Image: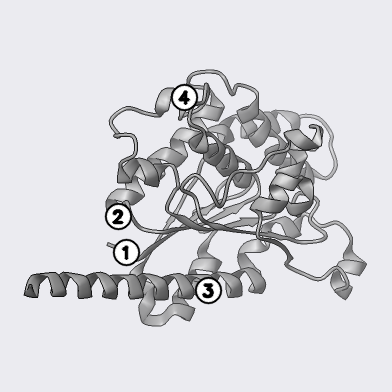
Amino acid sequence: MADIIILAAPGMGAVDSEFAAPVFAALREGLGEDWSRVYCDTLVCQEHLQPNIERIFEGMQKRDMEYLRARKFMLYGMAETAAQLSDIQQHGGNYEKSQEAIYRTLERVAKKAGENTPIVLISHSVSCVSLSNYLWDAQRPSISHGIWRDGGPGGVHKGSAMDLFLRLKTLSSWYTLGPTNPLWCAGLPRDKVQAVISETRGYRFRWKNFYHPDDLFGWPLKPLSPSYNQAVYRDYETVPLTDWRSASSGPQLGAHGDYWHSPLVQKMLLADVRELLATQGRQRAATAGRTRGAATV
């Protein structure tokens, strides 16, 4: 079994299976022998939407349009979240399918790496919204929609280690990269803009948010509402606004896809993973000491 789990969720657009490779490679190099103590996997929750989006885009190209790359980028960005939110109450709808994909991935990971293992979650772009919705529903004692309606899927005893794992209660760190959350809640009254819980109800994780100042889709989160201000540990600019490249280039589509290559993201993630591995090592040693002591009595 692994000492920690790292899960990476992709952002908008057609999913490239190697999307998280830059982050995983940086961790592998930085951790050295400790890399063997880490279980890494990807978590894809919008794949079922891609055939529909591609069909629409192909049909639209029968008309004359400029900026096709930018149009496709925006089509994916808006459609992936809108499709989920449009049928939130429907059994078997897109909202539920996205949550099922998250749930099944967590189920598989628990069997491979252990259901008590701490999780480091890295989500990009629209996946930040999907994971936020999943967490929000999992944190409610009762919910009338999504995968957690009526207490969640059958076959898992409520309060068991597996149930806690599937509800992400072993989550230790959450890195959100270029989150699009404000695009979907900015029209709500301030008191209705609510973040997931990071410090109570059995949850204790540090939420770090990263955004590029020229990324039109990626936003800081703490200013959204008092709830977000409390839940998010800190917003980090991946590039200073005073950087000459930002000042001269203006809004960039490319910036939204660069988070996996960000030196700041990789550096902070490596430090957090090292700290978590050290903590796990101390806990394992203490447990082994207590076991040996009990055996000698």
Residue for badge 2: 114
Q: Amino acid at mark 4?
A: Arg
Q: Are marks 3 and 1 in contact (CB under 8 Å)?
A: no
- Spatial separation of the CA atoms under disc 4 and disc 2: 25 Å
- Spatial separation of the CA atoms under disc 4 and disc 3: 36 Å
Relative depth, front residue between 132 and 87: 132
Q: Which mark is residue 2?
A: 1
Q: Amino acid at mark 3?
A: Leu
- Residue 203 rendering spot, x and y as whole percentages: 49, 50
Q: Residues within 10 Å of mark 3 (few under 14, many from 20)?
A: many
- Residue 295 rendering spot, x and y as whole percentages: 9, 71
Q: Earlier in the sequence, mark 4 or mark 2?
A: 2
Q: Quadrant of the N terminus?
A: bottom left
- Spatial separation of the CA atoms under disc 3 and disc 1: 17 Å
From the viewer's perspective, is 288 left or right of 50?
left
Residue for badge 4: 149
As drawn, 272 above or below 220: below
Q: Earlier in the sequence, mark 3 or mark 1?
A: 1
Whether residue 58 appears in this view of the structure is no
